[in-house]
Image: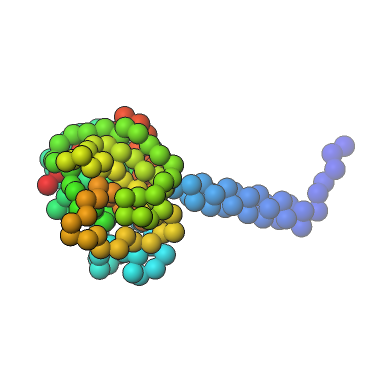
Amino acid sequence: MSARLPSWAWVTGLTTGAIAVVGFLAVQADQGTKPTAATSRPSASATADAKPSAEPEKKKPAAVPADSGTGRRIVYSLDQKRVWLVDASDAARRTFTVWPGTVSPDPGTYAIGTRTEATTGSDGVEVEHIMYFTAESGVSVAFSNAVDGSSPPPAAPDAKTGGIRVTKNDGRALWTFGTAGTTVRVVG
């Protein structure tokens, strides 16, 4: 003979299972956007002054530039001060604005080379998720984010900095997406 559970036990079991599934999905969502994610996730900023522009966050994401190549890549637009993480099917999985340094790379195709977990930037700011992809006029050009999540102060006009800063959340997503050898396409 089989034992029969009271109806409250079934409800309790179903509720516990549902809570476990929701918890699992919340942890997965917190891991950041992966290259195989089905939808893009908007970037989050801790404070209003940490945003690189006054763009409304609800605005439809900017389209990937037409001249940015094909396949899995990081696209960086000099004119728009924006980055896109594009998957192998040419779909943008994430896009966000950036704070460029005073030295910009020439338009072209590059690849992520050296990756460094954390260091001090040439402007004296502690940075993390540094991903170098070229050098211009002897200055290394790399994506990074400030460890404390702050936006960079305006560089002195004569300072030569190649850091392309992003928010902390966007820095984590970029670090996950941009493994060594990942194509970086710079457009005007």
Image position of 62 (left or right of 115): left
Res. 82 visible in picture:
no
Instruction: From the viewer's side, name the closer residue of 8 and 144.
Output: 144
Q: Quadrant of residue 167?
A: bottom left
- Residue 29 image offset from top left, x and y in percent: 48, 50
Q: Residue at the top extreme?
A: 181
Is residue 135 positioned above or below 55 on the image? above
Residue that appears at 15% across and 36% down:
108
Is residue 154 positioned above or below 101 on the image? below
Instruction: From the viewer's side, name the closer residue of 148 and 126.
Output: 126
- Residue 115 image offset from top left, x and y in percent: 38, 37
Residue that appears at 44% across and 42% down:
117
Q: Residue at the front extreme?
A: 158
Is residue 40 positioned above or below 179 on the image? below
Quadrant of the snapshot with the N terminus:
top right
- Residue 106 image offset from top left, x and y in percent: 14, 41
Image position of 152 (left or right of 5): left
Residue that appears at 26% across and 41% down:
140
Res. 181 visible in picture:
yes
Please name the colour scheme applied to the rendered image: rainbow
Instruction: From the viewer's side, name the closer residue of 7 and 58.
Output: 58
**Numbered marks: total:** 0
Q: Quadrant of residue 60?
A: bottom left
Image position of 118 (left or right of 68): right
- Residue 92 image offset from top left, x and y in percent: 28, 44
Residue that appears at 39% across and 49% down:
120
